[in-house]
Image (spheres, helix red, strand yellow):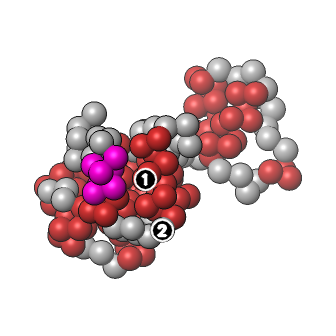
Amino acid sequence: MPDIDDSQKNITPTEMAAQYFKKGYTPEEVMRLMQSRKIFFPTISEVLNEFMGREKMSVERLSDLSDVKPATIYRIMKKERNPTRNTILRMALSLALNFGETQALLKSGNCALLSASRERDLVIMNGIENSMDYESVNEELVSRNMPDLNVRF
């Protein structure tokens, strides 16, 4: 399999995979190629741990701010549980992540990214861009008769 040219070494693994797909590779071929090059997509536990470390936030503090049980966060960190999209968004808002960081956390959790084509996502994006906390974003969603961030779906 031909490699991506050397001028593009600073692209993300996802961008690299997309380029291989554009060249006609199958998912299996891309996976083998990425593994042979030791390029791995970060897991939710790795990304969450990085952001918590940067903010010097304990699991207990994140739990208090996001209304996610400490046991659930520990299970996510130990790769024993996959969080829902709303759980990830609650943690992202509680960690005061910016839009790009929130998207990275959603992606690492295999969840749909925030999209301007969904009205509910626009409310959440506005909250992120205006540094609103989880409870304030939740109140805004409820005031607009939209599912809040505690709904499991």
Alpha carbons under labels 1 and 2: distance apart: 10 Å
Residue 122: in magenta span: no
For the N terminus, which image quadrant?
top right
Image quarter of residue 97: bottom left
| Mark 1 burial class by Cα count in 10 Å: few <14, some 14-19, many 20+ | many
> Could you tell me if residue 119 is visible in this image?
yes
Residue name at image x 42 percent, y 43 percent:
120
Q: In this view, does 36 lie above or below 6?
A: above
Q: Main secondary structure of the magenta part?
A: helix
Q: Nearer the viewer, residue 42 or 61?
A: 61
Q: What residue type is labelled 2?
A: Asn
| Mark 2 burial class by Cα count in 10 Å: few <14, some 14-19, many 20+ | few
Q: What element carries label 1?
A: helix
Position of residue 138 measured from the top left corner of the image (x, y, whole percent)? 29, 55
Q: What element carries label 2?
A: loop
**Which residues, given as a range, are shown in magenta?**
138-144
Position of residue 10 measured from the top left corner of the image (x, y, whole percent)? 73, 57
Please give the label number shown on residue 124: 1
Residue name at image x 70 percent, y 27 percent:
21
Image quarter of residue 111: top left
Please give the label number shown on residue 130: 2
